[in-house]
Amino acid sequence: RYNRAETIRNLLWKIGPVIPKEIEEKLNHWEEEYFKKHSAALKSYMSKVLVDLTVDMVPPKDPYIQVRVLEDIREGIVLSDDKNPNFARHSMHFLKRTDAEKYISRGLMEELTG
C-alpha cells in the first residue's frame, strides 16, 4: 500500500494535476481522492510561496517550444493562457514549455528541436 501511495504522489510530478483516463481507470476511489488532495495541498503551498515546483529546476533558454502531437488530445486540455487549441494527431504547435511538458511526459507530444 505504501508503494502505491508513493507511486500516486509521483504521478503529480510526472503528469501534472490532471489524471489521464487510462490511469484513472486503474485507481480506486480512495487513491483518486488521495491524488486530488495531494495535488490541492501542493497547489496551495506553491501559491503561498509563489514558486511552481513542477517546472524544470534549470531555467530553459526559451520559455516557448515547438511540439508535434503524437496522439489526439480531446479532453483535459489545460493551458496557462486559457486558449482551447485543437491538438489533433500530427499537428504542430508553439506552446509555453510549462504547458507542453505534461503532455510530453505522458507521451502525447514530442518536442521538435533544431
Image: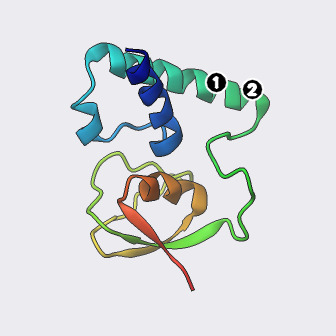
Quadrant housing the C terminus: bottom right
Figure check: 16 above or below 49: below
Label 2 belongs to which residue?
A: 48
Percent across and percent down for residue 43 are: 60, 29
Question: Which residue appears at 28% of the width and 68% of the height?
Answer: 88
Judge left or right: residue 58 versus residue 34. Answer: right
Percent across and percent down for residue 64 are: 62, 68
Q: Which residue lies most toward the bottom here?
A: 114
Three-letter residue code for mark 1:
Ser
Q: Which image quadrant is residue 72 in?
A: bottom left
Judge left or right: residue 75 versus residue 11. Answer: left
Question: Which residue appears at 39% of the width and 64% of the height?
Answer: 109
Judge left or right: residue 38 versus residue 92. Answer: right
Mark 1 secondary-structure assignment: helix
Q: Nearer the viewer, residue 68 or 94?
A: 68
Three-letter residue code for mark 2:
Lys
Q: Which image quadrant is residue 45 in?
A: top right
User: Is the C-beta separation of discs 1 and 2 under 8 Å?
Assistant: yes
Label 1 belongs to which residue?
A: 44
Question: Which residue appears at 61% of the width and 26% of the height?
Answer: 42
Q: Nearer the viewer, residue 10 or 77?
A: 10
What is the crowding at mark 2: few (fewer than 14 residues within 10 Å), some, or many (at least 20)? few
